[in-house]
Image (spheres, rainbow, N blue to C red):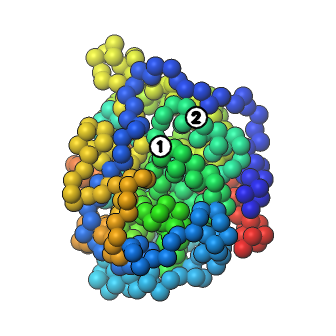
Amino acid sequence: MIAAVSLILSALSASTLVLAAPRPISQPAFEKKSALPTHWYHKRDHPVHELFRRGPGDDPLPAVGSPEWAANFAGVGQTPENNIPQKWLDALAAAEHAGLIPNFAPALTTDGGLTTSSYPPGTNAGQEPICSSMYQCRHQDDVWDAPANMIGLSVDDGPVSYPTASPRLYDFLKANNQKVTHFMIGANILGNPQMFLRAYEELDDDIAVHTWTHRHMSTLTNRQLVADLGWTLQIIHDSTGGRVPQYWRPPFGDADNRVRAVAMHVFGMTTVIWNQDSQDWTMAAPGGTTLPAIQAAFTRWLNGPRNPGLIVLQHEITADDVTAFINMYPLIAAASEAGRAQGLEPWRVVSVSQLFDGSADGTQGSSEHEGWYQNSWNNTAAVDDVDIIDGGYAASISDASLTAGATPTSRAANGTVPGGPTGTTIPTQSVSINSATVGKKGVWATVALGLAGVFALVL
């Protein structure tokens, strides 16, 4: 299966390029926080009842990549909603009964949510009650921005085994002792268990949820959402000694009030978006961006305003994605040196999970919070022997203060730090749009077809 996935993804990496070697950047001028424990604080007042069974009553978890490990996900396939544990459905029903899940219909799609998502004509998806992040509606509980002077590094869509994609990125991260947050696809973990272990064990990086199927989440029913998120959480739980991530990133940045409520009130997860898009995902399609264009964009962002800080959408699925990341890295040092001449502090570079957890300023946690995972301090600490894990926010979703006036778009713009002053710019046009550009449609149609082949062969 690993070979099959590699062959599929190699089609996305066929562009001609000179591959940067995974060498360390000597004497970085920016401040790195790589070796600190990861504690991303999370208010834990929403109980998640026995959803993944951690504690002394569990059987030992099978070795990652073993037939026994893979067998636990044999019934998931391309349609995880066909096999949903009853306890997940019970948790969903309880959240719905409590009025925590907004009651509006899923968005429209022409292909099962693989590449398209739209709302009915006349619907303003950028306002309450929908508040779609694709229309730049910033819900107050979502994470979009880094604190001032900070860069939160993350990569999406892994892990993959194609040699010039995830393996080359991981070599580079290790050589530079740089920590990132990996928003991983559940099906890719199943197909590439050894690469998952490299990120988790060898790099000691943060693992977050990027769904099982990489569909537009707004197009799925509540049951489908529970399955797509739940099975990704389950495979991460089963592959990390029982750890449960608190954060997820929706594919295409597609989350609305219903979607984020299911993630928060059923699974205790906070939605993480981004405030700049590298557009690296368009390089695999005709007419997409280029490596020089991405480098120019990073140069502009790194030498521009420092407040808010940067959370940039980047990927690890193709060779070009990884080259863009490697090319970006020394630009941080150059911008920090240029800033010193103007009396500015150097950029502080951490994983996304370290942005708000206190690890960057030395205030690492309290007895009420256990960091990035819901039941453990980090990748090596003990897992709590508990059957109920608190997470999310039990209060009903509150409306953000919104300011109208922008044009709808599927990408994010700079705004306020979650929990800070509101005043978000949202779109006012009532139009039905396709959230992905032609470039991303082409990429993900290829990935979707490829994953279908893997599931048919293996599962």
Between 30 and 138, the one nearer to me in the picture: 30
Task: Give percent across and percent down for residue 202.
Answer: 54, 45
Q: Is residue 308 left or right of residue 329?
A: left
What residue do we see at 60% from left, 37% from top? 171
Which quadrant of the figure contains the N terminus? Answer: bottom right
Measuring from the top left, give residue 274's x and y in whole percent.
43, 47
Q: Residue at x 45, y 76 (%)?
A: 58
397 w.r.t. 175: above or below? below
In front of the other: 28 or 59: 59
Q: Residues within 10 Å of mark 1 (few under 14, many from 20)?
A: many
Q: Is residue 433 left or right of residue 310?
A: right
Asked if one can make out residue 112 in the rendered structure from this viewpoint, the answer is no
- Judge whether residue 321 can be spotted in this image: yes
Q: Where does the image place residue 446, in percent across and percent down from the top left?
A: 73, 57
Q: Is residue 458 left or right of residue 382?
A: right
- Return the x and y of residue 44 as percentages of the image width and height: 27, 65
Q: Earlier in the sequence, mark 2 or mark 1?
A: 2
Q: Amino acid at mark 2?
A: Phe
The residue pinned by badge 2 equals: 172
Determine whether the residue tagged by mark 2 lies in a helix, strand or loop: helix
Q: Determine the residue located farthest toward the top in the rendered image.
A: 341
Q: Which amino acid lies under the numbered mark 1 shown in the image of this protein?
A: Val
| Quarter-of-image position of residue 247 | bottom left
Q: Residue at x 58, y 54 (%)?
A: 196
For residue 34, what is the image quadrant? top left
Of the pair 334 and 193, the residue shown nearer to us = 193
Q: Secondary structure at mark 1?
A: loop
Q: Name the residue beneath numbered marker 1.
A: 180
